[in-house]
Amino acid sequence: MLYNLQFSQVLFLDIETVPAVPSFHDLSERMQKLWIKKAEKLNKDETETPESIYDRAGIYAEFGKIIVISVGFLNGNEFRIKSYYGDDEKLLLEEFAELLNRYYNYPDSMLCAHNGKEFDFPYIARRMIINGIDLPLILQMAGKKPWEIRHLDTMELWKFGDYKNYTSLDLLTAIFDIPTPKDDIDGSMVGKVYWEDKDLERIREYCQKDVLAIAQLMRRYLNQPLIKDEHVIFADN
């Protein structure tokens, strides 16, 4: 269970994504047809339509976009958290790529997210390619052996080889008694808060809390003391 893990070499991260446009009717005609095909595979209820389930588009990199990438890293005794966020996805991805290229371009560097291998890491890579951004080395996977891919996933670590199991970050923080601030939103509400409420700051704060929770969960996995509140620093954004 990675008992020799050096926290100073790990970048903890979480992303928030939304549908690329506010509604199904805002899609181009070509993309509408493609979403209809996608929706046929997603429909589990005869009352559902491509329009009614368009709020799910944000979880697919082909139909969504990233609005927040929050990161956390250990700097001495401080755990520093900051976010790359905004309406301009290309700009925030360029800024995030610059961070990875400058500070996490080394053999011992690692990325860590909850369900990151299934969601965060591939989603970021796909959106970078779509936006014409060169992939930082740590996100490049083609031709690499499994042990050369420097990605950690707190959900995968909890599976212990049980591929059928999905365990949410909320549940894991609860069973490990990791304090988490009560939130007035969850992941299913992010699209509405972004497109309807226009409250990006609220989403950023939600994302940053998840980054801290992921780092604390890894500390529990390693049987190490939690990061103290006074050592958590939120960088200016």
Image (cartoon, helix red, strand yellow):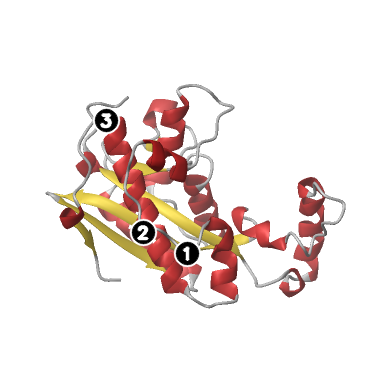
Residue where numbered disc 1 is placed: 184
| Residue on which the image places disc 3 | 222
Q: In this view, does 220 lie to the left or right of 119?
A: left
Could you tell me which secondary element the residue under label 1 belongs to?
Answer: loop
Tell me what residue is drawn at x 49 percent, y 50 percent: 125
Does 93 appear above or below 158? below
Q: Mark 2 points at which residue?
A: 208
Instruction: Classify residue 43 as left or right of residue 169.
Output: right
- Residue 230 % position (x, y): 16, 56
State the separation of the CA atoms marked 3 and 2.
22 Å
Of residues 80 and 150, which is closer to you in this image?
80
Label 3 to label 1, Cα distance in Å?
A: 30 Å
For discs 3 and 1, the disc positioned in front in the rendered view: 1
Look at label 2 and name its amino acid: Gln
* Secondary structure state at the residue bearing disc 3: loop
Q: For the point 29% across and 27% down, which residue is it?
A: 2
Task: Look at the numbered disc 2 and give the secondary structure of its residue.
Answer: helix
Q: How crowded is mark 2: few (under 14 residues within 10 Å), some or many (20 or more)?
A: many
